[in-house]
Amino acid sequence: MARLWATAEVQAGVDPKYQPPTSKIQRNSKIPSAKLYLYWDFGICVLIYNVSLCNEFSIAALWTGGFDERGLQDWAEDLRSRLRAPQASLGLVFMSPTFFPHATQVLEVLRVHARLPLLAGCSSQGLIVGAEEVEQEAGLTLGLYGLPGADLKGFHITQEQVEEANGPGYWRLETGLEPDQTNGWLAFIDPFHLDSESWIRTWNEAYAPLPVLGGLASGDPTEQHTQLYLNGDVFDAGGVLISVGGQVKLAGVVSQGCTPIGETWTLTKVEQNIIHEIGNRPAYQVLAETFSQLAPEDQKKARGNLFIGLVVNEYLDEFHRGDFLIRNLLGADARSGSIAVGALPRQGQTVQFQRRSAAAATEDMKELLTRAKQDLAGSTIYGGCLCCCNGRGQGLFGQPNHDAHMVQQRLGPFGLAGFFCNGEIGPVAEKNFLHGYTASLALFVKK
C-alpha cells in the first residue's frame, strides 16, 4: 500500500468530490489556520486542509479558529459534503474550553449544517483528528460516521442515578435497553461530579460483557469544570452514553502503556488493598527480586514506573497483554514485607509486575493493534473514536501524533475523532474499567 504524506500535487486517488482550483492543494479560505496534508492511497482518500484520513463511511476534521458562526456553518457543510456515505448516522464533537460560552450555538450549527441525527461528545484541552494529536490551542474536532444498519441511542446520566442504582435491572430500566438490544457503549463522563468507579461497577452488572469505551472529559485546569454534549444540550455534570446496536458493533483496543516484567505469580495472602504474600513469600521480597533481575538500564527506567497487573479472567490457559488490569503500586514496606496497590485484589488472583515507559507504551500499543488487525481481518471498519490519557502524547513519547498515527498506520485509513482524557474507559477480559495512562480505541465495525 503506497502512502505519501506531503503538501504535493494532486495526481491520483483524490476524493472525487474535491475539485481543486489548480493542480496544487491550496488553503481553503473557510478554514482558519488550516494545515495541509495529502494522503495518497490509490483511490482511498486525500487529506485537504485539516480534513483527516477518511474512508467511505467516516471522515473527521479540525476547526482551529474561534467561534465564528458563519465560518462554522460553511465548514460543517463542506465536511458533510465530503462524507461519501449517503447518510451521516452519528457525529462526535470534542471542544476545547475556549468554546464553553458558545457550546450551545456550536452544537446547533453542527447538527443543522452537518445534518446529524445524533451528536455527542465532551470538552477537552487536547483533541485527536485523523492521524493528528493537537495538544494545545486545539479548537474543536468533528467526526462524521455513516453506519449502515446501526441502531443508535443517546442518554445523559446523573450522579443521583448512580447513587440509586441497585442491581442489574436499574440501568436497563433507565435506558429501556436489555443487553441483547445493544452491542456496546460509548461513554463520555464528567470526572468531578459523577462517581465513575461506582457507575462503571453498576453498569457492568447491567451490561457486561458488552464493551464500554470512552473517557473522562477535561476542561480548564484551574477550575473543576467540564462540559458534556448530547444533540443540542450542554451538561456540566453526569455522563453521556451512546448505545451502538443493530448491524454495527464496537471493537476495542485498550493499551495501558506497560510491558510485563518477571514471572506471573499467585497472591497467597491479601487484606483489602495490601498484598502480604505472593507465592507464599513476602510480597516485598518478590517485588525486589523482580526488580533486581532487570538489566541495569531497565532498572533506571523502572524507578518510579513500576505497576502491578491483575488478571481479570483466571480461566484463560495463558496470560498475555490485554489480560491484565494495570494498577498503581502505592507503597512497599521492607520490614513487614507488604505492598499496597491501587486496587482490591483477591487471594488466589494471578499477578505480574509491569513497567511503564515510552518504549513500553509503544510496544504495548503496537502489539495490541496488530492483534486487533488479525482479529478483524475481513471485517469492515467504518470509523473510530480514540480517547488518550493526557499523560501520554508528546510529553511521554517525545514526538507528536504517536497514538493516532499508529492507529491509522495499522488499521486505517478511516475517520477518527477523539480527545485527551482525565481517565480512560475500556474493557479488560470482557469487564469494563477506568484506566490511567491508557489509549482507549473504539472501532465501529460491521456486525
Image (cartoon, rainbow, N blue to C red):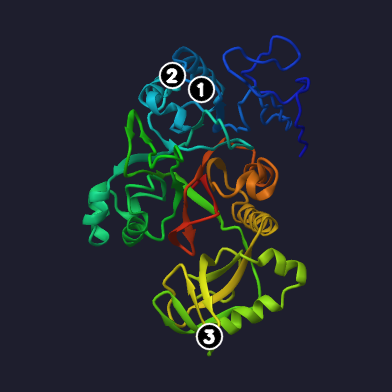
At label 3, the amino acid type is: Arg
Q: Position of residue 143 (x, y in %)?
A: 51, 32
Identity, as a three-letter code, of the amino acid under mark 1: Arg
As drawn, 182 above or below 52: below
Which quadrant: the N terminus?
top right
Q: Nearer the viewer, mark 1 or mark 3?
A: 3
Res 79 quadrant in image: top right
Residue corresponding to mark 2: 113
Count of number-bearing discs: 3
- Secondary structure of residue under mark 3: loop
Q: Residues within 10 Å of mark 3 (few under 14, many from 20)?
A: few
Q: How much space separates mark 2 and mark 3, taking CA atoms?
A: 66 Å
Q: Residues within 10 Å of mark 1 (few under 14, many from 20)?
A: many
Label 1 close to label 2 by CB (< 8 Å): yes
In the displayed image of the protein, which residue is found farthest to the top? 21
Q: Amino acid at mark 2?
A: His
Q: Residue at x 72, y 17 (%)?
A: 25
Counting residues from the start of the chain, the first of labels 1 and 3 encountered is 1
Give the image location of residue 187, x and y in percent: 41, 46
In the rendered structure, find residue 69 and report the number of the disc placed on it: none
- As helix, strand or loop, the secondary structure at mark 1 comes to helix
Q: Which residue is mark 3?
A: 335
Q: Is residue 176 visible?
A: no
Using the numbered discs, state the Cα–Cα distance from disc 1 to disc 2 in whole angstroms.
8 Å
- Relative to 37, is 21 above or below? above
Q: Horizontal placement of 12 versus 309: left or right?
A: right
| Residue position marked by numbered label 1 in the rendering | 80
Q: Relative to 201, is 267 on the left or the right?
A: right
